[in-house]
Image (cartoon, grey):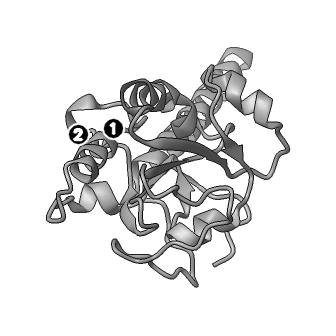
Amino acid sequence: MKKTLVIIWLIVLLGAIGALFWYNELQYQLPTPIPQNYKAVNPGELIKLNAKLKTNGTKPLFLHFFNPVCPCSRFNIKMFKSLVAQYGQKVNFVIVVISDRTYTAKEVQDKFDLDIPVTFDQSIALACGVYSTPQVALIDNKGKLYYRGNYNISRYCTDEKTNYAQQAINGLLDNNKKLFFSKLALTSYGCRLANCNY
């Protein structure tokens, strides 16, 4: 009888662990739920940013929306760093931290091992129509949204074959006004923003 109870207890425990694992995996494989009062921001719209973030008229602005506790954001660090290394001379990169925890700019820069601007202004997400992390908002040198979407379709945003962020940078730098992105590029996946009030 004792042995049977131990076996049943182990089966229940393993089942609970399996269910928790599947729930955590599944939530990142499904699109991020769209907030109830969400207002889409379309390519070509002028993005109102504070003076510190305005484009200087010569370089586009790449906003990287990042949440340090989001698994997708953490796995995406390597890809973001590779984009900064490749395009840092042609594009201004800024990390936009969206989190309900408090961090310093230095803590975030240390996570990336990059000395680039970090902002904690959550209104930027609203201005760009972003409601999950990691996400990209690429703004042209006239302050208009060129691309808002995913880095790629991989669960951890690391698939280089479908690197939408890089495609967007190349398209903008080549002045390609007819670049087409699939639904997978534009549907948000990842972690819902903390305190997302649309």
Label annotation for residue 154:
1
Hey, what amino acid is under mark 1? Ser
Q: Quadrant of residue 35?
A: bottom right
In this rendering, is residue 33 above or below 198? above
| Mark number, residue 162 | 2
Image quadrant containing the C terminus:
bottom right
Q: Residue at x 44, y 76 (%)?
A: 41
Q: Tell me the SS state at disc 2.
A: helix
Left/right of residue 43 with respect to residue 104 in the rendered view: left
Q: Earlier in the sequence, mark 1 or mark 2?
A: 1
At horizontal 27% and vertical 53% (from top left) the residue drawn is 172
Nearer the observer, 136 or 138: 138
Residue at (43, 42) in percent of width and height? 91
Give the residue type at disc 2: Thr
Give the x, y percent position of residue 50.
Answer: 68, 65
- Residue 65 pos. (x, y %): 57, 49
The reply to whether dot 1 and dot 2 touch (C-beta < 8 Å) is: yes
On screen, residue 188 above or below 21 = below
Q: CA distance from mark 1 to mark 2?
A: 8 Å
Observer-nearest residue: 104 or 152?
104
Q: Which mark is residue 195?
A: none
